[in-house]
Amino acid sequence: MPATPLSPLAAPSLPLHLARALRAVVGRELGRFLRQPTRLGSALVRPLLWFVVFSAGFHNVFGVAIIPPYETYIEYQVYMVPGLLGMVALFNGMQSSLSMVYDREMGVMRLLLTAPLARGWLLAFKLLGSTVLSVLQMAVFLLIALAFGVELAWANLPGLLLAMACAAAMLAALGLVLSVYVKQLENFAGTMNFVIFPMFFISPALYPLWKLEESGAYWLLKIAAFNPFTHAVEAMRFAMMGKFNAMAWAVVLGCTAVFFVLALWGYDPQRGFIRQKGGG
């Protein structure tokens, strides 16, 4: 039976229903994360490995470029930080997608979608929960990077945190879209290979894009320009230096809205995935 919005007679209690749904969905995400203390460690091992090992090996290769938003030579570790923050958010967004697929197979997600509340709110709360988890993990990694000597002006911190939150929301929304079309847990490995890794490596996360142009890989350069992850990284990179990249922010916010609408359409019982499966 499809979920139906609250009737007008219940309008006075709508904030209460929203608060309960917010606590249930976001609280469930946070509670699950807190009950799995190894999850934070596993989320940070990968970016820390790149941060410590990869930066040491390629310091002299990539650490001499002067590109926007930088106005002088920078260490490669400094260049990597926004990309690795994006890596944390990207993998957490995919973890959220995997969680959605698991909940759908176990029936929890179907029960949630039949709650007497417009499912747009439910998906928005799911998006919020995933975003909060991503930002928490990104903040921990940022603290570790600062402990390793990466400098960040305190005046730039609010803008960086906002850019981190928007990037996390975009990648969490992408995870919602993927959860619509990944029908079984066994198919998630293919998603990792065909979505996560191309998005990460065809971006300026680990190396400046002029390196692709210098090597003659113009087709990769064009793909990187259309890669939403590229703009998420650039928004954080500029924010880290106290600057604003209008194009990056426009792409991040626009993609977040588009991904969320696609996820909402996919979970619509009249048109999307739920109707195809005959459930909901």
Image (tube, rainbow, N blue to C red):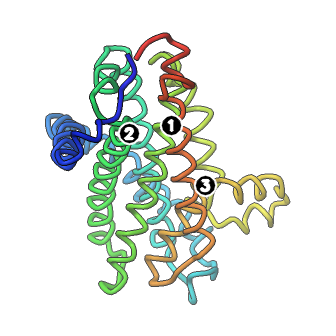
Say whether disc 3 or disc 1 marks the residue closer to the N-terminus. 3
Say whether disc 1 or disc 2 marks the residue closer to the N-terminus. 2
Quadrant of the drawing holding the C terminus: top left
Residue underneath mark 3: 228
Q: Kindly identify the amino acid type of the residue bearing the numbered disc 2.
A: Leu
| Residue at the front extreme of this rendering | 9
Q: In front: 157, or 1?
A: 1
Q: Kindly identify the amino acid type of the residue bearing the numbered disc 3.
A: Pro
Residue 96, horizontal then vertical, whole percent: 37, 36
Say whether disc 2 or disc 3 marks the residue closer to the N-terminus. 2
Labelled pair 3, 1 in contact (Cβ < 8 Å): no
Find residue 24 and report its image quarter.
top left
- Disc 3 vs disc 1: which is toward the camera? 1
User: CA separation, marks 2 and 3?
Assistant: 21 Å
Find residue 207 and report its image quarter.
bottom right
Report the residue at 37% width, 45% height from top: 124
- Disc 2 vs disc 3: which is toward the camera? 2
Residue 83, horizontal then vertical, whole percent: 50, 60
Residue underneath mark 1: 263
Disc 2 element: helix
Label of residue 252 in the image = none
Residue 193, horizontal then vertical, whole percent: 59, 32
Q: Kindly identify the amino acid type of the residue bearing the numbered disc 1.
A: Ala
Residue 227, horizontal then vertical, whole percent: 65, 53
Residue underneath mark 2: 123
Find residue 228 and report its image quarter.
bottom right
Q: Residues within 10 Å of mark 3 (few under 14, many from 20)?
A: many
